[in-house]
Amino acid sequence: MTEAIDGRLKELGITLPVAAAPAANYVPYTISGNTLYLSGQLPIEGGKVAVTGLVGRDVDVPAAQRAAELCAINILAQAKAALGGDLGRIRRVLKLNGFIASAPDFTEQHIVMNGASNLLANVLGDAGKHARAAVGMAALPLNAAVEVDAIIEIDA
């Protein structure tokens, strides 16, 4: 399965970055039994937050969807690090929690989260289909527009 995932990433033109180190007092992931819990990932690209500000004021929906996609790419990078480089150990993405820094009147958080959901489904196939939440927030760390965390079932 690892080869299939690598092939889909290549087809989509995605190179996974090196997993980012924590920015505060936490770990990037924990594993309990066959469940991988990934800390929130920001839309980091090239070592910096690529999309900043409030969605609906500073950031339009397509840019916010791209931010969510970048968060999903970073989720895959963290999962790869947690799983010793073997994304084939992913059985299923169980749940994503999406946090969208939103202007007070913005109500399309669910549309923004499609950026992350679509990417994971495209890369992982059925294993990438998941339950999720999409929540508007007043602000996020480093002024990021989007943050996404994940719970993933894995082969132990």
Image (tube, rainbow, N blue to C red):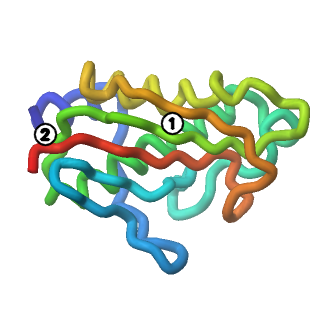
Q: Quadrant of residue 112?
A: top right
Towards the viewer: 3 or 144: 144
Residue 52 relative to residue 124: left or right: right
Residue type at tag 1: Glu
Towards the viewer: 151 or 147: 151
Residue 140 relative to residue 113: left or right: right
Q: The N terminus lies in which quarter of the figure?
A: top left
Residue 138 relative to residue 65: left or right: right
* Residue 147 numbered tag: none
Residue type at tag 2: Gly
- Across and down, in percent, residue 152 comes to 29, 42
Residue, x 36% and y 38% (percent of image)? 14
- Across and down, in percent, residue 65 comes to 61, 31
**Which type of secondary structure does the marked residue at label 2 adopt?**
helix
Q: Determine the residue located farthest toward the bottom in the rendered image.
A: 25
Q: Residues within 10 Å of mark 1 (few under 14, many from 20)?
A: many
**Which type of secondary structure does the marked residue at label 1 adopt?**
helix
Q: Quadrant of residue 95?
A: top left
Residue, x 68% and y 54% (percent of image)? 144
Q: Determine the residue located farthest toward the front in the rendered image.
A: 33
Nearer-N-terminus badge (1/2) = 1
Residue, x 70% and y 47% (percent of image)? 145
Q: Is residue 72 above or below residue 21?
A: above
* Residue 69 numbered tag: 1
Residue, x 52% and y 46% (percent of image)? 148
Q: Residues within 10 Å of mark 2 (few under 14, many from 20)?
A: some
* Residue 88 numbered tag: 2
